[in-house]
Image (cartoon, rainbow, N blue to C red):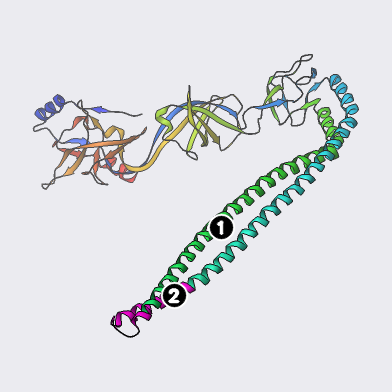
Amino acid sequence: MKSKRFLTAAAASLILLSGCGDPAAAVNTYSLTTQPLSRASEQNGRIVSEHGIVPVRTALTELPVAEVLCRAGQRVNEGDILFRLDGTALQEQISKLNQDADSAKQQSDLKYQYAAAQLAQAKESMAKQVQALQRREQELQNAASQLRRMYQETDARCENARLTVNRLAETLNAMQPDAENYTETEKEYSEAAEQYGSLCEIADSLALQIAQTEAELHDAEQDTESTRLDLEKEISEQEYELKTMQNDAAGSDAQTLEKLRQQSNSLTVTAPCAGIVSECIGTAGQLCDGLLAKIMPDDAFSVQLYVPDQAVLALKTGQKASFRTDASAEAYACTISDISAVRDTEGFAVRLQPQQQDGLLIGMQAYVTLILEEKEACAVPNAAVCYTDDGTVCVYTAEQQADGREIAVRHEVKTGIVDQDYTEIISDELQQGAQIILEPSDVYDGAAVTRNETESQHDQNT
């Protein structure tokens, strides 16, 4: 049992006033050490099937139930016949489908032949269009190549003309105007400069034509690619449609027969798994709506419970827990297998996986102990902790003085985990091995004490 010892300021003063000259109080002590501590939460749950509810369904919702071979609470095995459906209307449909099978196949064959002819025409048209676009590309490539050759030749002539102009300009600069050949050289320079200017204009014109031709070529390449992709997509769609028609034409009879076989097999509804029939919905003579029964598998159990908000954040899958039932006082060890991330009206759903199944039945009440926190920490027996009215928590230690006397020393502390037997102590002053006074209600800070050697030694050994 957890216990708290409260010590008021007035009581402490009274002890101080009346304690002068009193003989040393005999006390029991506990050697401070680490203890395995745990913080737990008690919750109520229920034993359920590990697999949940398994529905028993049929796809033939338009047929009446002819015979019911199960009842609520009955245990069934996988494959047991639970219901039989009336197949009279189904047999009429089967006969009609058989009569229509040949007609459907003929129509499918005609559609296939027409689609195949369209696909062949589309492929031929695509080939022609792509060839025309590729020819246009080749023409533009040839034109661009020719223009680049002309540009290179003109550029080379321009370079030669530029060198000639520069040479003549240097010659003129070095000559005097009255020199014998100055007029002839000046004329030669003017003719060379005029030729150089004409060549530059031709080169610029060729560069512009090259840029325009390359732009046209780029546009033509894009047009070719875009047209090719559009045509390929259209042909791909036609091929898919043709393949579908081909499969329908080739396998219409087989598909119809397989469908009829499946429907005929569905007239008998069997148990999809072993377990207990928790609910029998289908009744003889009534049209079924798909769901005929519910089965709760009983080959594996789990514990389902709902935990409050303040506890769910301390839980994680794989964490240890335990539970007991009204049928037995035995504690079942288990681990958390699933924690819902969404809260419903009852809390957060948690599922536990027991380590053993013996003695458990679906629907039993489970009294669950969830371990929220476990750790090793310095702790003292609950009886050693004092709580004052102002919220201060303290413990007393028996400490030996220089003159050999032992006195009680008060230490304010903080507490952590508190379980049924021990309280975690958080203090910078207390170290392991400190002699903690048990039942400190009769001592005060500085009071002379005598340790009960037998009790103290027992605690140390423990």
| Side of 55 relative to 152 (left or right) | right
Residue type, label 2: Ala
Res 196 visible: yes
Where disc 2 sits, the SS reads helix
Q: Residue 124 at what x, y percent from top left?
A: 77, 49
Residue 457 sits in quarter:
top left
User: Which residue is rendered at x = 70% and y = 50% of the image?
Assistant: 129
Where disc 1 sits, the SS reads helix
Q: Nearer the viewer, residue 433 or 108?
A: 108
Q: What residue sits right under mark 1 in the picture?
A: 213
Q: Residue 34 at what x, y percent from top left?
A: 33, 44
| Residue 174 shown in magenta | yes
Q: Point out the image quarter for the C terminus.
A: top left
Res 254 visible: no
Residue 49 sits in quarter:
top right
Q: What residue sits right under mark 2 in the picture?
A: 161
- Predominant secondary structure in magenta? helix
Packing grade of label 2 (10 A; few <14, some 14-19, many >=20) is many
- The residue stretch that appears in magenta: 157-184
Q: Residue 14 at what x, y percent from top left?
A: 12, 26
Decide which of tag 1 and tag 2 comes sooner along the chain.
2
- In front: mark 1 or mark 2? 2
Residue type, label 1: Thr
| Side of 24 relative to 68 (left or right) | left
Vertical relation: 237 (above or below) 444: below
Q: Point out the image quarter for the N terminus.
A: top left
Q: Nearer the viewer, residue 87 or 21?
A: 87
